[in-house]
Image (cartoon, grey):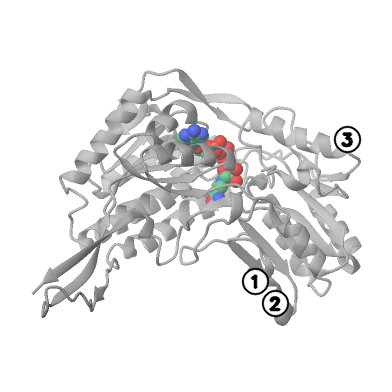
Amino acid sequence: MGAASSTGRIELLEDVRTSIGRIRGAFIDGQHVAASGPPLAVYDPSNGGEILSIRECDAALVDRAVQSAERAFRDGRWSKLRPADRERILLRFADVVESHIEELAQLESWNQGKSIHIARAVDAAGSVEFMRYYAGLATKITGQTFDVSIAVPPGARYTAFTRLEPIGVVAGITPWNFPLAIGVWKIMPALAAGCSIVLKPSEITPLTTFRLAELALEAGVPPGVFNVINGTGAIAGSALVSHPLVRKISFTGSTLAGKTIAKLAAENVTRVSLELGGKNPAIVLADADLNKVAPGLLMGGLFNSGQVCAAVSRIYVERPLFNELRDALAAGIKTMSLGPGLDPTAQINPLVSAQHKAKVERHIEAATAAGAQILLGAPSPSEGFYVAPHLVIGADPQNPIQSEEVFGPVMSLTPVDSAHEAIALSNASRYGLAASLWTESLTRGLQIVPEIQAGTVWVNSHVPLDPAMPFGGVKQSGYGREFGDKALEPYLETKSVCIAH
Ligand code: NAD
């Protein structure tokens, strides 16, 4: 059995501590601005200690941030730059972020609780890759030309074409699991398209977003083009998505909040894209290679302590492989050490908050009470928001652990008699974000992929993302796609131009 990690935490860079000293609740027109709402504490999940307390933005300050972004959009300081100049500044922004990878990674690990290795490689360095991909799209915005057939007046000739124009002020809203990376997924397409953005990070994990705003300014993004407001969904978030000057909302978070936001957006007929929750299945066929499946599922399910929207949550395995897979997964989770994200030897890190830990534990208790068999990993450290990894076996399909998003280090394992049964169980969910299929047969893989109701299907892996590969959900996992060569479309309006000649 693994043990609580004892090596200790890495020393924080001086820049990490000084950067949080500048935060005052909002970043507007290139400056930190003091918010005056109720204090919101930001915690270190590894020990429950307070990192700092930030006041919430009220509706008046949210309005100031949106008005600033609208001014920046209307005067053309960004929206009317040559595409090549926008691209150049955004590439410089990526370079500046790249030169602060360690600082950003430490900040994220400290506040979110995640492994410093993940924070460095995925949150920080991974974001730089996404930034460069999006920067390049700034010079690839193209309309179409048309041969039109308008016949009045007789003999008239027309030429028509479309222009794709930036939509205006974007409201970006991010969750607490990957604040830096998901923030980049909002900021970069908005800025590449020529929009301005007001970004609201989760009030639980706002630190890297404020640093990102400072770095954007340093790279040459003009003041007012990228503003930040901090606060809860109920106050700052609602004020932002209801603001009449916001023309597009890009939201990543829970399905519950997404539904509320879609209703608020409807009032102003504001365009919305929703990246929501998931309850992601993995289908393991009997011909799968266990040497790939077991480590792949442990990574896909326990990466970031399971706090990943696309994480493996339900595993359906054809019966001949069930015992071997159960034993391999159980052996894996039992050897994982628990400890702070800033401890490089720790493999499983705390959950983000005491409230979230309690929610995950409620799910586990309910499954246990309903008679599911639970195999669990190393004991949790005594302080901090830890939950040991769990493998739940034999839970009823109706049990919430099989149907609700748990968002923690918990996977359920269910034997099935056929691929057909696995597909039916996988699809019997209100969610449809992502799924994986494990098989050595290309033919069976290609037959099954179209049957799976999900925005992404990985074959023989689970969870890798790439900026070239569109990502998003079906059903109650949301609508719209991020990434890919069409990633700017939601941030652009199509204007038809028809010229009589
Ligand atoms: P959440 O929905 O509670 O909060 C997300 C963000 O929305 C936060 O910034 C929050 O303050 C804000 N918010 C909440 N209510 C709001 C409202 N009424 N108006 C405006 N803003 C509001 O989600 P969370 O707990 O921070 O994150 C976990 C959830 O995010 C999980 O459900 C997870 O699946 C989802 N998620 C989805 C993706 C994806 O790409 N599909 C990625 C990461 C996380």
Q: CA distance from mark 3 to mark 1?
A: 37 Å
Task: Describe the element under mark 1 as helix, strand or loop.
Answer: helix
Task: Describe the element under mark 3 as helix, strand or loop.
Answer: helix
Name the residue rendered at 80%, 68% in the picture.
420
Task: Determine crowd level at label 2: few under 14, some 14-19, many 20+ residues with C-alpha closer than 10 A.
Answer: few
What residue would you read off at disc 3?
Answer: 369
Q: Quadrant of residue 488?
A: bottom left
Name the residue rendered at 47%, 45% in the picture.
251
Residue 29 seen in the current view: no
Task: Determine crowd level at label 3: few under 14, some 14-19, many 20+ residues with C-alpha closer than 10 A.
Answer: few
Q: Relative to the observer, which residue lies in front, 227 or 303?
A: 227
Name the residue rendered at 32%, 26% in the picture.
61
Q: Amino acid at mark 1?
A: Pro
Q: Which mark is residue 2?
A: none
Q: CA distance from mark 2 to mark 3?
A: 38 Å
Between disc 2 and disc 3, whose residue precedes?
Answer: 3
What residue would you read off at disc 1?
Answer: 450
Q: Amino acid at mark 3?
A: Ala
What residue would you read off at disc 2?
Answer: 447
Q: Relative to 96, is 416 on the left or the right?
A: right
Q: Relative to 117, is 40 on the left or the right?
A: left
Task: Describe the element under mark 2 as helix, strand or loop.
Answer: helix
Q: How many marks?
A: 3
Q: Relative to the observer, which residue lies in front, 127 or 155?
A: 155
